[in-house]
Image (tube, rainbow, N blue to C red):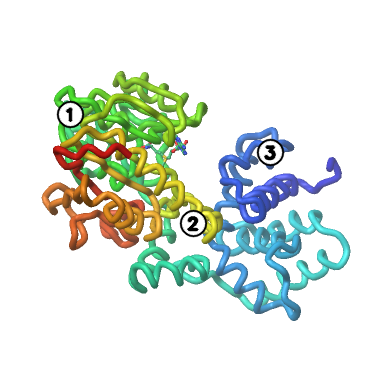
């Protein structure tokens, strides 16, 4: 290891990160500690992360280039393909000089693969290849989204990963939106919202330590915008951590119970409440079995494939296999039925997912009403309940697709539906 040329340990860490994400389905951030154990310096770790993240963003385009220059098919999980992706992404997207891009990667390989990688890289560099703009998404995702949404949505999704997305902040209530937009040098697209350009250091921004705002994509604020003012009534935030929606509910005057089964994520929720000086009862529990007296409103922000956040975490597009989507949909179906059993007659149930898969959104909503039509009704969302640029679908559900508010910097993919429990309904669960 000590004989490694300078820069090779960083590339080895990048390779480990890609292996964890693509072969083992581990989220990129979660893979960092294990993959970067050899790296002492923060900037080396940051560079390993940057190489891996950029490789993931460019994977279909990098693989297409590799395939044009190899005579025999290189399996997707071959180490030589991983090494080539890392060398190419540096040369073509990260401005690493060509000789450094390849010389730091070759020590990761032995024998035949080393020759192959050297040869393919040299051929492509001689050809003066470039990566296309905008990047392509994985073929299976493009096919699925074209079928569910449209070819235009796929094109918009490609464009939305061409550059890092802006960052949205939700302001604590009582703060003047225009004043804070100016203080943070951002723009506001809705009351209580400020959008700032990508790349600013969050902890350094005005108001962070005072808890004046929290980071939350504008699309992620929509579910709570549709619950209305709490006026001291009781709301349950089911699957609540790290607490973006819990804070919104508390800020809107709800008496909130926040439930999540993940201890580390609940810890972040507690820290967020402390920083913003907002309050909620916090419970670590499995949402499938959580029991309490019925609530006026229940928000289920269900665990999902998370394909809606692909602009920031492009690896979700590789992790969200059809199997994962089907498993998530089965869990969501159980969770929505249990969440419904915790709503008082006349009360509201909001179901939300940051997924761009109809099986986790529209199909869950349809199935819920089909199973519960005597006790529950869809409560259609009106256009004027949503910030400018977002529109309900024709039955009053909210589907935020790629391309929504594109001119203003876009939004995460989301699905939100609101149901009302009929007064006089007696069925529980
Ligand atoms: C989409 S995230 C929630 C985001 C959160 N609502 C917010 O706005 O910050 C889904 C959450 O569901 C939690 N979760 C997954 N399965 C669960 C279960 N069976 N019971 C409780 N929480 C669960 C995860 O720990 C994760 O925090």
Q: Is residue 193 visible?
A: no
In the image: residue 114, left or right of residue 372: right
| Mark 3 surroundings: few (<14), some (14-19) or many (≥20) residues within 10 A | few
Q: Mark 3, mark 1: which one is toward the viewer? A: 1
Residue located at (42% from left, 34% from top): 287
- The image shows residue 149, relative to residue 424, as above or below, that is below
Task: Judge depth for marks 2 and 1 and give the one in front.
Answer: 2
Q: Position of residue 241 (x, y in %)?
A: 41, 32
**Secondary structure under the numbered disc 1 in the rendered image:** loop
Residue 43 or 252: which is nearer the viewer?
252
Q: Quadrant of ligand 1?
A: top left
Question: What is the C-alpha distance between the residues marked 3 and 1?
Answer: 44 Å
Q: Position of residue 221 (x, y in %)?
A: 27, 41
Name the residue tied to disc 1. 230
Q: Residue at x 41, y 27 (%)?
A: 269
- Under circle 2, the secondary element is helix
Which of pointers 2 and 1 lies earlier in the amino acid sequence? 1
Disc 1: CA contacts within 10 A as few (<14), some (14-19) or many (>=20) = some
Q: Which circle marks residue 34 in the picture? A: 3
Q: Quadrant of the N terminus?
A: top right
Question: Circle 2 is placed at which residue position?
Answer: 326
In the figure, is residue 195 to the left or right of 58? left
Picture quadrant of residue 280: top left
């Amino acid at each position: 290891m000590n004989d490694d040329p300078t820069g090779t340990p960083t590339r080895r860490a990048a390779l480990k990160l890609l292996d964890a994400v693509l072969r083992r389905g581990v989220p990129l951030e979660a893979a960092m500690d294990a993959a970067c154990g050899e790296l002492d310096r923060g900037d080396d770790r940051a560079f390993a992360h940057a190489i891996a993240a950029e490789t993931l963003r460019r994977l279909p385009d990098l693989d297409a280039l590799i395939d044009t220059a190899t005579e025999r098919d290189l399996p997707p999980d071959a180490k030589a393909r991983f090494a080539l992706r890392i060398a190419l992404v540096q040369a073509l997207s990260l401005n690493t000089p060509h000789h450094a891009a390849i010389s730091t990667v070759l020590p990761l390989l032995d024998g035949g693969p080393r020759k192959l990688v050297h040869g393919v890289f040299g051929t492509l560099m001689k050809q003066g290849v470039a990566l296309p703009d905008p990047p392509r998404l994985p073929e299976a995702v493009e096919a699925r989204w074209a079928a569910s949404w449209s070819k235009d949505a796929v094109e918009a999704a490609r464009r939305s990963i061409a550059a890092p997305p802006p960052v949205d902040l939700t302001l604590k209530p009582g703060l003047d939106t225009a004043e804070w937009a100016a203080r943070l040098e951002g723009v506001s697209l809705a009351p209580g919202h400020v959008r700032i350009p990508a790349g600013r250091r969050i902890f350094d921004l005005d108001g962070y330590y005072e808890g004046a705002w929290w980071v939350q994509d504008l699309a992620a604020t929509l579910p709570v915008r549709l619950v209305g003012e709490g006026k001291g009534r009781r709301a349950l935030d089911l699957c609540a951590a790290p607490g973006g929606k819990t804070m919104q509910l508390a800020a809107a005057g709800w008496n909130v119970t926040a439930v999540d089964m993940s201890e580390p994520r609940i810890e972040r929720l507690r820290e967020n409440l402390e920083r913003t000086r907002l309050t909620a009862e916090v419970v670590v529990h499995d949402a499938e079995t959580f029991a309490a007296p019925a609530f006026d409103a229940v928000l289920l922000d269900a665990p999902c494939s998370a394909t809606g956040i692909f602009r920031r975490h492009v690896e979700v597009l590789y992790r969200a296999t059809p199997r994962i989507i089907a498993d998530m949909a089965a869990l969501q179906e159980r969770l929505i039925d249990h969440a419904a059993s915790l709503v008082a007659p006349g009360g509201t149930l909001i179901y939300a997912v940051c997924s761009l898969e109809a099986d986790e959104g529209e199909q869950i909503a349809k199935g819920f009403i089909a199973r519960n039509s005597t006790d529950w009704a869809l409560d259609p969302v009106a256009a004027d309940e949503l910030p400018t640029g977002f529109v309900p679908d024709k039955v009053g559900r909210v589907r935020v697709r790629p391309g929504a508010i594109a001119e203003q910097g876009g939004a995460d993919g989301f699905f939100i539906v609101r149901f009302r429990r009929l007064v006089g309904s007696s069925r529980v669960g």
